[in-house]
Amino acid sequence: MIFTVAIDGPAAAGKGTISRRLADQFGFAYLDTGLLYRAVGAKVADGVEPAKAAETLRAADLTRDDLRSHIAGQAASKVAVIPEVRRALVQFQRDFARQSGGAVLDGRDIGTVICPDADLKFFITARPEVRAHRRYLELGGDEAQILNEIIERDSRDMSRADAPLRAADDAVVIDTSDLGIEAAVAEAAVHVTARLGG
């Protein structure tokens, strides 16, 4: 069975947690596509040219222990606006999405660009202040600065010419601002179950 779930949304909205939980619950493979861009950003920081970093990306590059850092997240957002980087990573993601047994992919343009024919699309969002507070609790630092960086990143992701962040027209939108993770996962799971035929 090939069944693709595309999950998009801005940083710290909860899409990664929801995606992992859905993949576990339904036995689907899971890909955090943001890790691809974080890995490219890390390679660029190591001195590799961006397009080359994307073209030579291997599964082992996704296991680096520095990919979840705030610096890697900022680097990812910067390399993600480079069309050559995006093109190099598209096929990697599409191949993953079409594997037998089902797949969940989360990112910024999965439902709109990578898998426009996905069986089910979600757009997970939350107010910027809520997302900044979550990131602060996760990583520490200056909450006001984190909020500014989230707003800047949203602007960069939503205004880029190539595959801007937006909800697909047929996406199920889940706002997690006032939802606990259990409730958000349960809401998403209802849609997956229904689409799978009960």
Image (cartoon, rainbow, N blue to C red):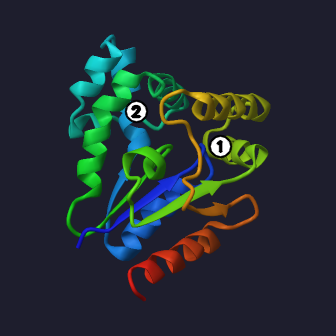
Residue depicted at x 55% and y 31%: 70
Tell me: residue 77, above or below residue 93.
above
Q: What SS does tag 2 mark?
A: helix
Quadrant for the N terminus in the image? bottom left
- Compared with 174, 111 (above or below) is above
Residue 135 is labelled as 1
Residue 37, quarter of the rendered image:
top left
Q: Can residue 42 be seen in this view?
A: no
Whole-percent x, y for residue 183 in the image: 64, 74
For residue 154, the mark is none
Badge 1 element: helix
Q: How far apart are marks 1 and 2 (CA)?
A: 19 Å
Residue farthest bottom in this picture: 198
The quarter holding residue 198 reads bottom left
Query: Could you tell me which residue is drawn at 31 percent across and 35 percent down?
Result: 89
Residue type, mark 2 in image: Tyr
Q: Name which quarter of the figure residue 34 lies in.
A: top left
Badge 2, how many Cα within 10 Å: few under 14, some, many 20+? many
The type of residue carrying mark 1 is: Arg
Camera-side residue of 92 and 168 = 168
Res 39 visible? yes
Provide the residue designation for mark 2.
Answer: 37
The residue positioned 74% from the left and 58% from the top of the image is: 177
Q: Where is residue 15 in the image (x, y as percent from the top left)?
A: 54, 55
What residue is at 51 percent from the left and 32 percent from the top? Answer: 73
Left or right of residue 130, residue 155 in this image: left
Residue 51, compared with residue 134, is above or below; it is above
